Image (spheres, rainbow, N blue to C red):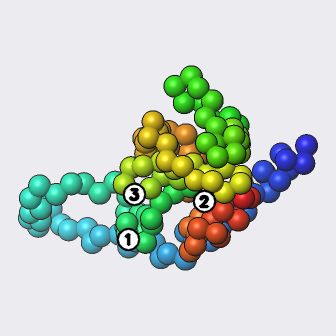
Amino acid sequence: MFRRARAHREFRDAQRAGYALLRMHPTQPLPDMAGPNTPAPAAPEAAAPDFLPPDLRVPSRQEVSGLMMRWEQPLIIDGEVRSCPECGAYRDWIIFSMRDDSVWLRCRAGHETQEPRLDAAWYNRNSGPVDGFHATLEEGLRHLGH
């Protein structure tokens, strides 16, 4: 019962923080509407369309060195329960997705190991939305309860 209330409270806090972040950025002004006789501007050559407006994009890759999420249940990879090679823990992981497409696991005891059978695509399929950016690894771990 208390876990559900705590999860709801944390979710509401994350929503409030996201709403405050959105309110900090001014809205984009509408472009001037040209008359029917005005020629259309030339399209840029071979430019990829932008999926998100600049205000909603993730900071540059130099600022973000990786993503992390908490994985409380046993981690099953290829039908095998993954355990820590040093202490034997098999649940309550912190999973890191790094910029080089590698995935690292950290057990509750702080042992870290790379998991070559997982990649960034697996991480993206199993993680939720990013709810905050942290200046240090320790701050991120504290946010996730480790």
Spot occupied by residue 35 in the image (x, y as percentages of width and height): 18, 66
Q: Amino acid at mark 3?
A: Arg
Residue 136 visible somewhere in the drawing? yes
Residue that label 1 marks:
62
The mark that comes first in sequence, 2 or 3, is 3
Spot occupied by residue 97 in the image (x, y as percentages of width and height): 48, 52
Residue at coordinates 66% horizontally, 49% vertically from top-left? 107
> Callout 2: helix, strand or loop?
loop
Horizontal side of 73 relative to 38 (left or right) equals: right
> Callout 3: helix, strand or loop?
loop
| Proximity of marks 1 and 3: CB atoms separated by less than 8 Å | no
Residue that label 2 marks:
131
Residue that label 3 marks:
99
Residue at coordinates 25% horizontally, 68% vertically from top-left? 33
Measured along the vertical axis of the image, is residue 126 above or below residue 131? above
The mark that comes first in sequence, 1 or 2, is 1
The mark that comes first in sequence, 1 or 3, is 1
Measured along the vertical axis of the image, is residue 6 above or below residue 41? above
